[in-house]
Amino acid sequence: MVLSAAIVLPLILDGERPAELDVQVRVTPTPDFEPINIVPAQPIDQFHETVQQEAQASTDDIRLISVPKPAVDRPLVQNATPPQSTESSAPAGERWTLQIATFKSQDNAIRLVDKLKEANYSAYSITTNSLYKVYVGPEFKREVSNKMREEIKTTFNLTGIVVKYSVN
């Protein structure tokens, strides 16, 4: 064993360096950063006074802007007149939409939406359970949706139902 070590070790440790280790590594100089000044901790009473002073200074810069008047409900079809209702208005946030049709094919739903949009109706499609439902609306008043249902029934021969509008 000693004899084999005496023969093999000089061959291994001959002093030559492998080519993989002859790599020059250059390190770029560190970038110059601006020093950060850290403010020492303040008592909580002084902090509240500073915040109040800053808030007072920022309120001096507030300017009032004019707000446009809210839009009035108007029918989607240009020649129609809005219905006159003597009932009280619907609760805030309650809207109505007209469900026109339900399709298994997305292409059919897209064609109907395009046809309704060409007739100046705000039509859209929603996918639920692999079915494509086509809607027109939403409207704030159910009466407007009912009137649209009658117009679409005479124009396109499609009978729809008025349902509560849901965002999701």
Image (tube, rainbow, N blue to C red):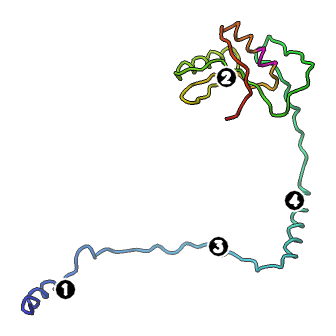
Horizontal relation, residue 81 to residue 114: left or right = right
Mark 2 residue type? Tyr
Question: Which stretch did the figure color magenta?
Answer: 143-147
* Image quadrant where one finds the C terminus: top right
User: 10 Å neighbourhood of mark 3: few (<14), some, or many (≥20)?
Assistant: few
- Mark found first going from the N terminus, 3 or 1: 1
Mark 4 residue type? Ser
Mark 1 residue type? Gly
Q: Which residue is mark 1?
A: 15
Regarding mark 4 in the picture, which secondary structure is present there? helix
Regarding mark 3 in the picture, which secondary structure is present there? loop
Res. 58 mark: 4
Which-is-in-front pick, marks 3 and 1? 1
Q: Residue at x 17, y 86 (%)?
A: 13
Distance between mark 3 and mark 4 Cα atoms = 28 Å
Compared with 48, 93 (above or below) is above
Distance between mark 3 and mark 1 Cα atoms = 48 Å
Position in image of residue 95 (x %, y %): 78, 28
